[in-house]
Image: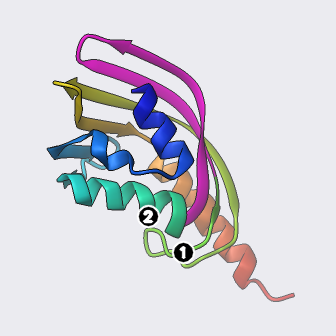
Amino acid sequence: MDDYLHALLDGADFSRFFAPDVVWTTMETGEEVRGRDAVRDLIGSLHREVFEARPELVSLVTGDGIAILEAVFDGTHTGTFAGIARTGAHVRLPYCMAYDVSDGAITALRSYFPMTALTARLTEAGRSVDAPA
């Protein structure tokens, strides 16, 4: 997990730590993304396309076949997200990730990210951007 997190934070190829059939689940919505490339693209998009963001690591707990990460999403909204055009808003939201690990590869990621709160903040920021001066 340490090597995966270093690769993610350093902009290196973090997908090499995923099993070919890895599954990402957004727990709040139930949305699933399957496959190494698709999960890599989702994470990359959230950190470099839709937001200019960097996770701030708070804690990491690992056990036999599982890891739990607590972090803060710190980013600026730079692209369309959930139908909301770029607002330039800066957001900071705490979240957790649960990982299943087997034979040295991440097989599942469960994202406990506050999507409703993020969407609400961006919607409000979008109203501010669109308001007449």
Q: Nearer the viewer, residue 90 or 83?
A: 90
Q: Residue 36, image x and y in percent?
A: 22, 52
Q: Which image quarter holds the N terminus?
A: top left
The mark lying in front, picked from 2 and 1, is: 2
**Circle 1 crowding by C-alpha within 10 Å: few under 14, some 14–19, many from 20:** some
Q: Amino acid at mark 1?
A: Gly
Q: Which image quarter holds the C terminus?
A: bottom right
**Which residue lies at the image location 24% right of the left edge and 47% below the top edge?**
30
Q: Is residue 19 left or right of residue 79?
A: left
Indicate the quadrant where residue 41 lies.
bottom left
Q: Tell me the residue that label 2 is attached to.
A: 45
Q: Is residue 133 left or right of residue 61?
A: right
Q: Is residue 64 magenta?
A: yes
Q: Residue 15, image x and y in percent?
A: 31, 48
Q: Are marks 2 and 1 in contact (CB under 8 Å)?
A: yes
Residue 94, placed above or below residue 35: above
Q: Tell me the residue that label 1 is attached to.
A: 79
Q: Nearer the viewer, residue 77 or 127?
A: 77
Q: Which residues are magenta?
A: 51-74
Q: Nearer the viewer, residue 118 or 55?
A: 55
**Which residue lies at the image location 65% right of the left edge and 66% below the top edge?**
124
